[in-house]
Image: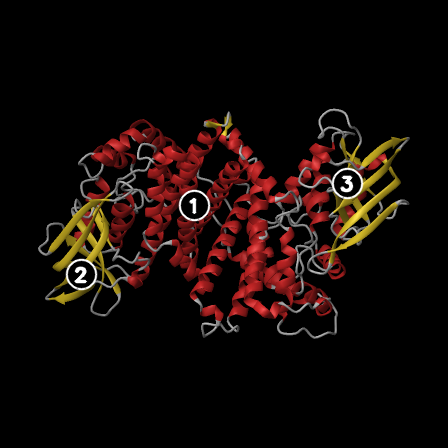
Amino acid sequence: MNIDFAPELEAFRAEVAAFFATAPTPAIREAGRKTTSVFAPFKECMEWHRILFEKGWVAPHWPKEHGGTGWSVEQRFIFAEEYRKADLPPLLPQSLGMVGPLLIDLGTDEQKARYLPGILSGEDFWAQGYSEPNSGSDLASLSCRAEADGDDYIINGSKIWTTYAHHANRMFMLVRTSNEGKKQQGITFLLLDRTDYPGMTIRPIIGLDGFPEQCEVFFEDVRVPQAGRVGAENEGWAVAKHLLTHERGGGNAASPTLMRYCERAREAAAVTPSPFGGMLAADPVFQRELGELEADIASLGHFEKLAISGHAIARDPAFPSINKTINSELIQRASTIMAQVSGVGALARQLEALRVGSNVEPLGSEFDLISMPLYLNSRATTIYAGSNEVQRDLIARSLAGA
Amino acid sequence: MDFNYTEEQQMLRDSIGKYLEKSYDFDARQKLVRSDAAWSAEAWQQFADFGLLALPFTEEQGGLGGSISDCVAFAELFGKHLVIEPYTSAVVLSGAALAASAHPAAQDLLEKVMGGEAVVAFAFEEGAGTPSPAHVAMTAAADGAGHVLSGEKRLVIAGAEADALVVAARSDEGAPALFLVESGAAGLHPRAYRTIDGRSAADIRFDRVVAQVLDCPAEVLDDILARAVIVQCAEAVGAMGALCAITAEYALTRKQFGVPIATFQAVAHRLADMKIAYTKARASLLYTTALAQGGAATQRDVAILKAQCGKLGRAIGEAAIQTHGGVGTTDELSVSHYHKRLIACDAMFGDHAYHFRTIGRS
């Protein structure tokens, strides 16, 4: 066992902190402070993506030959910690965290050459077309249909919960190419070069926090080239499952973000009066609840470090499900405490003040501005990427093999 | 970063694991607990032969120069087998206190501890789940060239059988310090009992007991306790792992309504939660051990580990009993005994409620 505490690492930390202190524009910083979801405000987030790309730091979790940084686990965590300290917007996961790593693992040389540069540079943004109105947790029952026609497929059907599809210029999706055999057979994984093909309609859905984050995407005789297929026809389920390990397993650590939420809650509680007298931060029940949450987030951080360093704990077949379950439930608990600290201060609906670049002054503090939207938005974390009920089924199933 | 056991540690685990599988299975352990013996002299001798009693001490002191991760590597197995021998109190706590002292009596005694010829108990707990030296209230009054101790210590593991006691008390200046007391000293009134998890312990009243001060600096005392907490958490994690495995196997084979109960989603999800809890606890154990090995574990880091093992261990134990149904509530199965070990680990050195609050306050 060993953790590297070499003095060079402190020099690295200083280098990262110095870059984060100077490189982001004021709008990017504002977007970071006003991020109330896993998905940061799109425009500023992509501006920041391009700045990080120029610096060579956009994909620390990618293999070096494909544009990764080649950093040690220690360096990756230092980067993540400084990132959160600076309250910068997290990069969007669909491109860098999902389709990019998938193409590195399973794409053809041609697909890699065609798509990886745009993913890294931030020129492209990909949407994920998986769920359908009648296929949520039971994803393999999906019915959006693709018929082969010459060198093309013709797609009919619809996708839903397609995050930021209204901002995306590319899309990866699952389609049904056969109804033979088991439902998992007959699924094909497709890359779409455009999101404005004739017959394709994107309808944003306003979420419970008041923001259009999710979308519905309709396909009516949409003709796309077969060259965008990853893996063989009817064998897309294996490809999708492979991608899910990236989506649920995550390349980047979530614990620094969650710890930052706790810090913000503690800071806010220090200036929030308790009905029992004194400030909320001195209330024993609050201290106990926050401490319990922080300890759980610390354990997630320990788990993430073990995983990133290649410990056997991450080779457990249930690893992606365990990671997703812990992570998603901690986001909910952290945002619950935040909204609790804000109390009635979180009840004002302030969508305009929350917009980046808005000239509307928020009522109350910036903490009160974000805590309720974050709480509301995080109701989705235990539902998306496979509901936590499905994750627990998978974890329990892994015990049979043990 | 590397959180794997080294090849040497793996070999040590293999040989101790083999010994415990063969000679310390659950039936043998239960027979031992029901006997009049406080613990197994034979097992203690085996631990001495494996080098465990000398492991944490430097080579200059006659030890093997082992590290905290060495101790964690085999302490997981102690938890898995519900070992009742007083390793943490006699070696990790008292042994380390003796090793930190330049007192000639301490050095002599340490040699005997390493050789398995003496057992030294650690008298620290005062009844409130004493979490740190700062909470110690017992006073040591100066008396001629030495000190006299008055007050009460609780849950002193091996307290009635030990050849000597290392006692935490406040000296005249008010700072917590450690004192050495010979067994059978005048004014010592031990009341011995078996703990719910099978160990031999004593509550001891001190009535002007003559003691020698061990010149062990306060920060060394903090460090000794931190290491003991980590080793005790390793035991708890070992017990949690065993409970997860036993319970999964039971749920996959026990049939009701014609099918294994693991096929019911309510049961399956409880098994999943047990695995999640175990994963968190073990990740925190290995990470905190590596931190301590690098000399970088803060009190907060150790508090997080202690609190997590306390809360998660208790949850795993309760889930294991529920999943086993009626038989889980009996004395015959190992399940309830694991649960009682986990409850004991939680209660000692500050329970999870205490540590969560200190974490949240900082």
Residue shown at the point (15%, 58%) measured from the top left: B206
Query: Left or right: where does residue B35 sit relative to residue A14?
Result: left
Q: Are marks 2 and 1 on the same chain?
A: yes
Q: Chain of mark 2?
A: B
Residue designated by label 2: B151
Is residue B296 shown to the viewer in this render? no
Q: Secondary structure at mark 1?
A: helix
Residue shown at the point (10%, 56%) measured from the top left: B187
The image quadrant that residue B324 belongs to is top left
Q: Residues within 10 Å of mark 3 (few under 14, many from 20)?
A: many
Q: Chain of mark 3?
A: A
Residue A173 got which mark? 3
Residue shown at the point (76%, 25%) measured from the top left: A180
Q: Residues within 10 Å of mark 1 (few under 14, many from 20)?
A: some
Relative depth, front residue between A133 and A324: A133
Q: Amino acid at mark 3?
A: Met
Q: Amino acid at mark 2?
A: Gly
Q: Residues within 10 Å of mark 2 (few under 14, many from 20)?
A: some
In three-dimensional space, the C-alpha distance between marks 3 and 2, rounded to whole angstroms, equals: 72 Å
The x, y position of residue A269, in whole percent, is 52, 69
